[in-house]
Amino acid sequence: MNLIFFLGIVSLFADITYEGARSIIGQYLFVLGSSSLFVGFIAGFGEFIGYFLRILFGYLADKTKNYWLFMIIGYSINVLSVPLLAFTNNYLVAGILILLERMGKAIRTPSRDTIISFIGSKYGYGISFGIHEFLDQIGALSGPLIVSLILFLSKNNYKLSFLTLIIPAILCLIFLIWTKIKFSNISEIEIKTKNYESFKSSKKFWIYTLAIGFVSFGFVDFALISYHYKKINLFEPTIIVILYSIAMVTDAIASIILGKLFDRFGIRILIISVFLSAFSNPLLFLFNEKALSFLAIILWGIGIGSQESIMRAYISNIIKKEERATAFGIFNSIYGFSWFVGSLLIGYLYSVSLIHMVILSFSFQIFGLLLLLFFQ
């Protein structure tokens, strides 16, 4: 379990770095003279390549078995692209660095998830991914808070904010290399307790991936949630930030609880979490009441927690280790593509009809849930 903790610390410092940057990147591009179209393109395309390229790098990781190399290269690109933003005055160059940061995440994620799955065979896949997500979310919560403090103290000096993030970036790489040295023969850790399947012929894997694709298609990003709250003036801007923080805390706590329950009860826990989170959208967008909005944010955080922990744990539970990075890559690519296309359609429907948007979002998530319920 020490390996899970150290990988969690690596992710914690990585998240401080790039989540801190992502909290101000839109403002920074505006300052550099970017158009809103360019901001939207970079944000959307960055997320797309951050997921889609995982197919390639998952396949390469499985072929070479050099998971640590892909992690070192990926994390290096991922975190070092951020402080470099301090040295550009051109929004096009800044956009390239943002895309590089997302590419770095695509390079390292399948290998990292595979390594977590090896140790998870001993302690439980759910709790292993849950602990990692808990530490990861501490970083995701801390990064924006640190950046907001730097902006406040420096009177909105964006370049200083990006430059300061080189500290957690270097700490991330130091902990990663130290962990690699300490746990070099990671593939030998896995305990074979069952007959795992090839993703190529696994009916469970493909139905599961399709089902989660439907769930992610209907899942609303917090960017649209915050946009909605700002539009209807239900909360002050500072309260919206607090709501996001509440969601991240819920995500962190839920990831451990759901992970532990998953190891005991299996996919039923995933089905329950998807069912609960599906109701966040009706509560968020159809009822302009603060109490219901707080409840919806909790449900939304549970949804994120399940996506970042037990959804990956299930793949570890069925796919053999020789193909696991490839399976993670395929799963995450379909997941990310579905989220990207779903976000575009949901964003369009938001401007046309809230009720139709909510129906579409809810229906896709419930359909994914039914696939899980009847075909697993």
Image: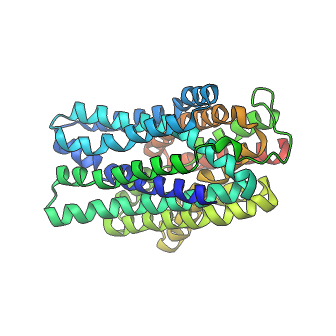
Where is residue 37 shown, x and y percent of the image?
30, 34
Residue 344 in view of the camera: no
In the image shown, does 141 or 270 lie closer to the viewer? Answer: 141
Label tally: 0
Does residue 22 appear in this view?
yes
Q: Is residue 337 above or below residue 314?
A: above
**Quarter of the image holding residue 196?**
top right
From the viewer's perspective, is 374 left or right of 5?
A: right
Residue 307 to residue 72: above or below: below
Q: Tell me: residue 245, above or below residue 220.
A: below
Q: Is residue 277 toward the left or the right of residue 291 in the image?
A: right
In percent of the image, x 43 and y 63: which residue is there? 244
Q: For the point 40% across and 48% down, which residue is it? A: 173
Instruction: Name the image quarter holding residue 12.
Output: bottom left
Find residue 154 and report its horizontal and vertical position in percent: 14, 62
Q: Residue at x 50, y 39 (%)?
A: 71
